[in-house]
Amino acid sequence: MDNFVVIGAAVLGVYLVIYNVCIKGASCKSNAKLHGKTVIVTGSNTGIGKTTAIDLAKRGARVILACRSQQRGEAALAEVKRESGSSQVVFMQLDLASLKSVRDFAETFLKAEPRLDLLINNAGIFLQGKTEDGLGMMFGVNHIGHFLLTNLLLDRLKECGPSRVINVASVLHKNGTVDFGYLSAHKALGEGDSFLAMLQIYSNSKLCNVLFTHELAKRLQGTEVTCYSLHPGTIKTDIGRYNSLFTALLIKPISMLFFKNPVQGAQTTLHCALQEGIEPLSGRYFVDCGVKDVSPKAKDDAAAKKLWELSERLSGLA
């Protein structure tokens, strides 16, 4: 029995070290207040998006919860108001799987709201299928929807500068590829319904996020708008809520022990949104509240430009 106690204590000790060093991550240190500022957070009805919205509302920002589901969005609205103590929180419906919805959202927002200081492209999906515009679901939601939204709101961001665009990507972008031939032919980043195939497509979409940020920063030079991409960590959220029961049961015990909670996962987003002095790092990629270098394929000028031009065509901007 004593041996079991010793072994158990040792295992617990090792786990606590791993948790505090590798899992918990850094915290946003900014004390910035945002009174008079307006923020959009996509996918803010759940997970790190909702946590981000609560934090920004506590700092005095007017926060727009941009969510697909009206029911979930209104529930989140009540929770964000309650947790933040702020009445300056608004729900606006946005379905990133619909280019029409993105355009309607932007039109409604620009008519109703005079300012935009922070655009946080947080929403993401891990799901196969097609959008209503015939795009691969993860390509359409994780990249094209945010690409179109950002471009439609850029003029307002420029008017209100200094302002920022934050794109929530993932360390999985390192495993991603963009096959432009396949993308042009199929309007998708890959095929297959197995978990590994879907993981590859998700990784491809996250590489798109990083390339988009890289190219956007170039196009924003000379303005007072900066942009950043980031890896929030591996988070205990419901991004995989549409997965099979088998996959969910497989991931659950791992996530309980080794994934960040949403508060921890929101810290790098908040750092990129709030930290003073990072303007010269526009276009860069952040992990644990610090800038990190990326592989050559994630800052490939030619690929980033090609993705931008293709995205313009597929989103109807060109």
Image (cartoon, rainbow, N blue to C red):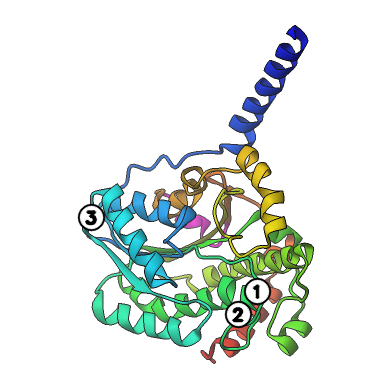
Q: Secondary structure at mark 2?
A: helix
Q: Earlier in the sequence, mark 2 or mark 3?
A: 3
Q: Position of residue 26 (x, y in %)?
A: 52, 38
| Residue shown at the point (75%, 81%) measured from the top left | 180
Q: Would residue 17 appear left or right of 46 to someone viewing this image? A: right
Q: Which mark is residue 308?
A: 2
Of residue 263 and residue 226, the one placed in the foreground of this image is 263
Residue 23, quarter of the rendered image: top right
Q: Earlier in the sequence, mark 1 or mark 3?
A: 3
Residue 141, quarter of the rendered image: bottom right
Of residue 52 and residue 230, the one placed in the foreground of this image is 52
Query: Nearer the observer, disc 2 or disc 3?
Result: 3
Crowding at mark 2 (Cα within 10 Å: few <14, some 14-19, many 20+): some
Is residue 207 in view?
Answer: yes
| Residue behind mark 1 | 304
| Residue behind mark 3 | 35
Crowding at mark 1 (Cα within 10 Å: few <14, some 14-19, many 20+): many
**Label 1 vs label 3: CA separation?**
35 Å
For the N terminus, the quadrant is: top right
Per the rendered image, the range of residues in magenta is: 277-284
Question: At label 2, which amino acid type do we have?
Answer: Trp
Q: Main secondary structure of the magenta part?
A: loop
Question: At label 3, which amino acid type do we have?
Answer: His
Q: Position of residue 6 (x, y in %)?
A: 72, 12
**Label 2 vs label 1: CA separation?**
6 Å
Crowding at mark 3 (Cα within 10 Å: few <14, some 14-19, many 20+): few
